[in-house]
């Protein structure tokens, strides 16, 4: 009976070690994949969300100003006639 318990303990220890090793490997693989993805994204020269939002706001403001100028021009042209 004692031998059986030791055998089960040894199997449990080995399974525990294997699970720890698998977890460590998973973390290492995740870090490697993240590193590679970051390098690829850096090479693509993409803009950040903040930069995109700033340019979008600038475009919206420009569009509004252009519409105001167009309306003003229409009024001036109608007065001219």
Image (cartoon, rainbow, N blue to C red):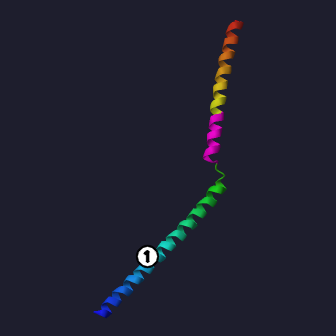
Q: Magenta stretch containing residue 80, yes or no?
A: no
Q: Quadrant of residue 35?
A: bottom right
Vertical placement of residue 35 versus 14, above or below = above
Vertical placement of residue 81 versus 12, above or below = above
Rendered location of residue 4, percent (x, y): 30, 91
Q: Nearer the viewer, residue 71 or 6?
A: 6
Q: Quadrant of residue 50?
A: top right
What span is colored magenta in the figure? 47-58
Vertical placement of residue 61 versus 77, above or below = below
Residue that lies at the very extreme toward the front in this rendered image: 2
Q: Nearer the viewer, residue 9 or 57?
A: 9
Q: Magenta stretch containing residue 54, yes or no?
A: yes
- Which residue lies at the image location 57% right of the left edge and 62% below the top edge? 34
- Which residue lies at the image location 54% right of the left edge and 70% below the top edge? 28
Rendered location of residue 66, percent (x, y): 67, 25
SS of the residue under disc 1: helix
Determine which residue is flagged by label 1: 19
Secondary structure mostly seen in the magenta stretch:
helix
Vertical placement of residue 7 versus 69, above or below = below
């Amino acid at each position: 009976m004692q031998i059986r318990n030791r055998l089960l303990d040894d199997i449990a220890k080995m399974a525990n070690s294997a699970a720890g090793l698998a977890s460590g490997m998973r973390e290492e693989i995740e870090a490697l994949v993240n590193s590679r993805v970051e390098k690829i994204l850096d090479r693509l020269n993409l803009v950040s969300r903040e930069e995109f939002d700033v340019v979008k706001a600038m475009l919206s403001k420009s569009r509004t100003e252009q519409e105001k100028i167009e309306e003003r021009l229409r009024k001036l042209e109608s007065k001219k006639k």
